Image (cartoon, rainbow, N blue to C red):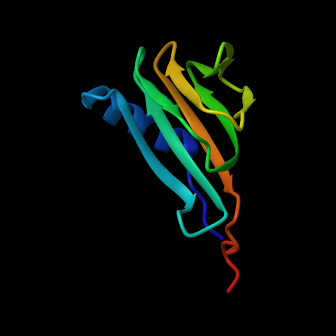
Amino acid sequence: MNKLSLDATAREQLERAKAELSGRSSTTVFGGHEYVLRQTVVALKEGSSMAEHNSPGEATIIVLSGRVRLSAGSTSWEGRKGDLLVVPRQRHSLEAVTDAVVVLTVAKTGSTRVPGLV
């Protein structure tokens, strides 16, 4: 079993995001491209965003700190600390309303490998 402090990871990623020109920083904390499940801590400086993109599978966002806006087409949802947002399957974007850190969980469709199983 592995243990990770999401609070410490969030602080570290937000510091990095504030230093980046893009205003973003992220690190995968579980899984990866070769797995079905991937969890990534994403930090966004206020006003920065993840531009509109497709989702590789089912996805959720848990807001660890700050406020974000998830948009798909003409619809948007605002999330704040403690909120869970279900990412729509259509093209979408994520914007930081304030400095924010989220955990993005993606379960890719079409993948067959399960972490921890051979």
Nearer-the-camera pick, 38 or 98: 38
Q: Residue at the spot x=61%, y=50% of the render?
A: 56
Q: Is residue 46 above or below residue 31?
A: above
Q: Is residue 103 above or below residue 5?
A: above
Q: Residue at the spot x=52%, y=43% of the render?
A: 41
Q: Which image quarter holds the C terminus?
A: bottom right
Q: Is residue 54 left or right of residue 114?
A: left
| Residue 86: x %, y % from top left | 75, 34
Q: Which image quarter holds the N terminus?
A: bottom right
Q: Is residue 106 above or below residue 44?
A: below
Image label count: 0
| Residue 81: x %, y % from top left | 65, 23
| Residue 3: x %, y % from top left | 60, 60
Q: Is residue 87 left or right of residue 5?
A: right
Q: Residue at the spot x=44%, y=35% of the render?
A: 11
Q: Residue at the spot x=32%, y=36% of the render?
A: 16
Res 87 → quadrant: top right
| Residue 19: x %, y % from top left | 25, 30
Q: Is residue 31 left or right of residue 116?
A: left
Res 6 → quadrant: top right
